[in-house]
C-alpha cells in the first residue's frame, strides 16, 4: 500500500509539473495558457530604456558634428560614425572594424546605442567612461591613426567650429572638450519604446505570446543573471566559455584581443573575460561576439546556451528566445546630418 501511495503521488506530481511548465515552451499558439501574459518577476533589475537623459543640448549638437567628422582621422577618411553607423544599429555589420588605409581591427565594433548604460567601455572594459573611450580610436594606428596635435591643427581652421567650442567652454577647442562633446552625443543615442519596454511599463499586450514565453525562458535558464539592467547587459564582466572551451572549438589561433580583461589587469583569472554586451537592438547588430565570428542571432543563442549554460536548446526554446530578443528593438530618434 505504501508503495502504491508513493507511485500515485509521483504521477500526480509529474502531471502538475507538466501542466505548469511544459505548456510555456511546447504548446502551439492555440494552446497557450492565459497566465503566459502575466509579467515575469525577477530579483534582477530589468527596467525600460528612458525616453531621455539630462544632457546638455549644446554639447549633444556639437558632439553630433564631431561624431561624423572625418577630420579626426589622420587621412580624413574615417569618422566615429563609420564604425558606429546609426543606420546599422550603431555598429558596422562587419566582423571587425576597418580603419584608415583599409586596415582590419581585431574586434567587432560594439553598438554605440544605449552605451550610456555601460559600466565600462570597450569589450575588455579598459575605458571607464565614454569620454575616455572617445580618445582611443583617434590614437589607435589601425583605426584613425591620428593624434591631438594633428586633430587640433585641422579643427582650428574651422572658425564656426571654434566658436561653438568657445560658447560652451571657456578654454574653447581642447582635447578634453572634444571628448566631452562626443561622449554627450553618444549618451543621447537611446532607443526607447521597444515592445519589451512597453511590456515592462504595464502594457501586457505589447508582446506576442511567443515573446512572453521567450522572456520567461530567458529568466528560467538564467540568462538574466548576466544580461540585466536597463541595457540587458553592459553592467558586469563574464567569462566566455564557462561550460566549454569556446576558443579551442572556434578553430583559429587565440589573439591578444581574445584575452579580454586580462589585457587590462594581467590577472590570469581574467583571461577570456569580457564586458557582457547589452542585448538592446541585438537583432540588427550582427555579426556577434567580440571576434565577430557568429553571423546569425540563432547561432549566437545556441553558442551562448552551449558555452555559458552547458546545454543544447530545443527548436521551440530557440524560437521563443529569438522572439523575445526581437522585442528589444527600440526607436532611435537621432538622424544623421
Image: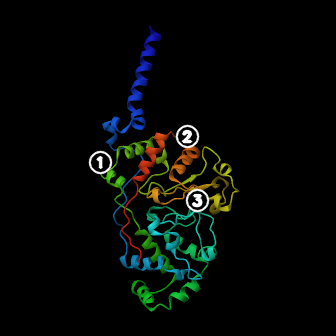
Q: Percent position (x, y) of residue 87?
A: 44, 68
Q: What element carries label 3?
A: loop
Residue annotated with mark 2: 312
First of labels 1, 3 by sequence position: 1
| Label 2 crowd bin: few (<14), some (14–19), many (20+), radius 10 Å | some
Taking the image as drawn, is residue 21 in sight?
Answer: no
Spatial CA span between label 2 and label 1 = 30 Å
Residue annotated with mark 1: 205
First of labels 2, 1 by sequence position: 1
Question: Which mark, by number, is residue 33?
Answer: none
First of labels 2, 3 by sequence position: 3
Towards the viewer: 163 or 292: 292
Towards the viewer: 295 or 35: 295
Question: Which mark, by number, is residue 292?
Answer: 3
Total marks shown come to 3
Taking the image as drawn, is residue 78 in sight?
Answer: yes
Q: Percent position (x, y) of residue 58?
A: 37, 79
Amino acid at each position: 500500500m505504501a508503495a502504491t501511495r508513493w507511485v500515485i503521488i509521483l504521477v500526480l506530481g509529474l502531471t502538475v509539473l507538466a501542466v505548469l511548465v511544459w505548456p510555456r515552451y511546447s504548446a502551439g499558439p492555440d494552446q497557450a495558457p492565459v497566465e503566459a501574459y502575466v509579467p515575469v518577476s525577477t530579483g534582477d533589475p530589468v527596467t525600460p530604456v528612458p525616453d531621455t537623459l539630462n544632457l546638455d543640448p549644446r554639447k549633444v549638437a556639437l558632439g553630433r558634428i564631431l561624431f561624423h567628422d572625418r577630420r579626426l582621422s589622420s587621412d580624413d577618411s574615417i569618422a566615429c560614425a563609420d564604425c558606429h553607423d546609426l543606420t546599422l544599429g550603431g555598429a558596422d555589420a562587419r566582423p571587425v572594424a576597418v580603419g584608415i588605409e583599409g586596415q582590419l581591427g581585431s574586434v567587432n565594433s560594439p553598438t554605440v546605442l544605449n552605451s550610456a548604460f555601460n559600466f565600462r567601455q570597450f569589450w575588455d572594459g579598459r575605458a571607464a567612461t565614454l569620454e575616455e573611450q572617445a580618445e582611443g580610436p583617434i590614437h589607435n594606428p589601425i583605426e584613425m591613426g591620428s593624434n591631438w596635435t594633428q586633430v587640433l591643427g585641422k579643427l582650428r581652421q574651422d572658425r564656426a567650429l571654434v566658436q561653438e567650442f568657445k560658447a560652451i567652454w571657456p578654454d574653447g577647442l581642447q582635447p578634453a572638450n572634444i571628448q566631452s562633446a562626443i561622449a554627450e552625443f553618444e549618451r543621447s543615442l537611446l532607443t526607447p519604446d521597444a515592445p519589451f519596454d512597453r511590456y515592462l511599463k504595464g502594457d501586457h499586450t505589447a508582446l506576442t505570446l511567443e515573446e512572453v514565453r521567450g522572456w520567461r525562458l530567458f529568466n528560467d535558464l538564467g540568462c538574466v543573471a548576466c544580461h540585466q539592467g536597463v541595457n540587458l547587459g553592459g553592467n558586469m564582466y563574464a567569462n566566455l566559455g564557462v561550460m566549454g572551451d569556446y576558443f579551442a572549438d572556434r578553430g583559429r589561433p587565440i589573439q591578444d584581443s581574445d584575452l579580454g580583461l586580462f589585457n587590462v589587469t594581467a590577472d590570469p583569472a581574467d583571461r577570456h573575460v569580457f564586458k557582457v554586451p547589452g542585448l538592446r537592438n541585438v537583432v540588427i547588430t550582427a555579426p556577434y561576439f567580440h571576434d565577430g565570428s557568429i553571423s546569425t542571432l540563432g547561432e549566437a543563442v545556441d553558442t551562448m546556451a552551449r558555452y555559458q549554460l552547458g546545454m543544447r536548446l530545443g527548436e521551440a526554446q530557440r524560437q521563443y528566445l529569438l522572439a523575445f530578443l526581437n522585442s528589444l528593438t527600440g526607436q532611435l530618434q537621432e538622424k544623421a546630418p
